[in-house]
Image (spheres, grey):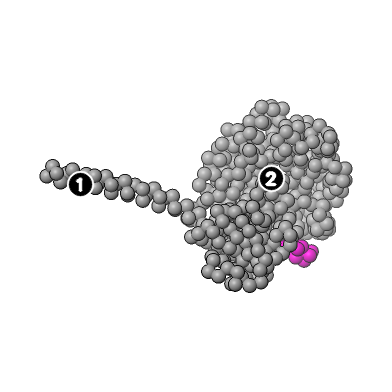
Amino acid sequence: MEILKWRVLPLLSLLVSFLFFYIKTSSKSSTSDCSLLPYDDYWISSKRIVTPNGIISGAVEVKGGNIVSIVETEDLNEKFGSARVIDYGEAIVMPGLIDVHAHLDEPGRAEWEGFSSGTKAAAAGGITTLIDMPLNSHPSTISEETLRLKIEAAEDKLYVDVGFWGGLVPENAFNTSALEGLLNAGVLGLKSFMCPSGINDFPMTNSSHIKEGLHVLAKYKRPLLVHAEIQVDTESHRELQDGIGDARSYSTYLRTRPPSWEEAAVRELLTVTKDTRTGWPAEGAHLHIVHLSDARYSLDLIKEAKSNGDSLTVETCPHYLAFSAEEIQDGDTRFKCAPPIRDENNKEKLWEALMEGHIDMLSSDHSPTIPELKLFNEGDFLRAWGGISSLQFVLPVTWSYGKKYGMSLDQLASLWSERPAKLAGLEFKGAVATGNHADIVVWEPDAEFELDENHATYHKHPSISAYMGRRLSGRVLATFVRGNLVYSEGKHATTACGVPILAK
Ligand SMILES: NC(=O)N[C@H]1NC(=O)NC1=O
Ligand SMILES: [Zn+2]
Ligand SMILES: [Zn+2]
């Protein structure tokens, strides 16, 4: 009996250690759940690959999450033989979209959106990286500690890569060590408002706060993003405060935020951006104006400042390019956003500026809420939450409307990937190029679909999106994030393997 015990025990311990090793390695290999492909060394081929050197027919080699080579070839079979090739035929292979302006609202307001639903929607829409705004979550991301809360809340929930903007608010603007703490913790830059943000713990800044912020940012070579509207006390504004005007009519809301608000903000900002010119005190800093709506005087001022050498960029959003004020129905608060969607003529001018290169990039400004706060029953434009839900649809929307204005695939890739990557300082993203992350969207530009309730939409509240009911063209087939096939034909990878992007 004793002998048996001495024989069995070592065998048993061998078995236990074997089992332990097996479980450990197999749980490690379960990272393949990050991808709908069972391998990480393969080729993506197509007749239309959008690269910085033009559109080619060929294949992209992916290894260990990176693009390791790109070849132009007519006969793929001959070249690759039995290599693992995913052939997408005529579909477009393009850099994944980088959305530099999205509100995912977690922690604190996960019932509005959240990291999981938001990044699933992003993946389904061909977005491979998004940068989360510092407000609408609770608390706002305005300190090192609150950034940590963001990162904790995002853990295991990211289907795409996510970076974070920090908030520049009066509380931290003159506190250099607090701002540096936030920047050292890894925010990719700062964001501030020149008017009330709609969120109590995210108060507005004036130009002295902005000037201070820019000087700190100069050292880090990271940008300041600004919501450029200043409340100018116009006559119609006073009228509205006196309760005149039908709150269900979009034109009433439009009068509360005239283009002069944007113009006043831009004018004031440009007194500060002078400092970013070469040889001036804030050289190295950069100012980025978010969601421009006014295509008239505000845009003229921006063009002039750029030509004077200010380090300045500007974005607009698909909703300003897709919709015009005239078509917004009474009470349809899905369309309420700030700055507001302006008239048809302004929209045409925005397109002109975009196509001529005066607007540098596009972003979603996906800013959802719970349907209750859109006040659909009252249809009150003055009291409803301002923010458009669009994250999953920005690629088909940009394409559907853009192709009428002659937008090319190169322009699309520049507006949605290359320039946003540069703004956010993402060195290895933004282009299908050797050495970059394999962040790729594959899509069919001519495939049309009806955006109705049968369309699989991953936003937490699809019904509040202004795009519902539209017919769009441009269907996303597949999305790769660092080589992981995170979305394909209506399915997501089972594990969320996106990573937080922190500046160093
Ligand atoms: N707080 C917030 O998300 N505001 C955004 N919504 C919107 O329509 N414009 C904004 O700046
Ligand atoms: Zn804004
Ligand atoms: Zn926003």
Q: Residue at x 67, y 56 (%)?
A: 433
Q: Which residue is mark 1?
A: 8
SS class, disc 1: helix
SS class, disc 2: helix
Which stretch did the figure color magenta? 403-409
Single out the residue that lies furthest toward the left: 1
Residue placed most toward the observer, 79 or 44: 79
Residue placed most toward the observer, 480 or 304: 480
Residue 176 coordinates in the image, percent (x, y): 69, 28
**Label of residue 493 in the image:** none
Indicate whether 83 appears above or below 236: below
Can residue 464 be seen?
A: no
Which amino acid does the dot numbered 2 rest on? Ala
Residue 244 coordinates in the image, percent (x, y): 78, 46
Can residue 41 be seen?
A: yes
Residue placed most toward the observer, 204 or 124: 124
Task: Count numbered badges in the picture.
Answer: 2
Label located before the other in sequence (2 or 1): 1
Which amino acid does the dot numbered 1 rest on? Val
Q: Residue at x 24, y 47 (%)?
A: 11
Circle 2: is it few (<14), some (14-19), or many (20+) Cα within 10 Å? many
Q: Which residue is mark 2?
A: 424
Circle 1: is it few (<14), some (14-19), or many (20+) Cα within 10 Å? few
Residue 148 coordinates in the image, percent (x, y): 56, 36
Classify residue 229 by image quadrant: top right
Q: Quadrant of the N terminus?
A: top left
Q: Residue at x 48, y 55 (%)?
A: 32
Comparing marks 2 and 1, which lies closer to the viewer? 1
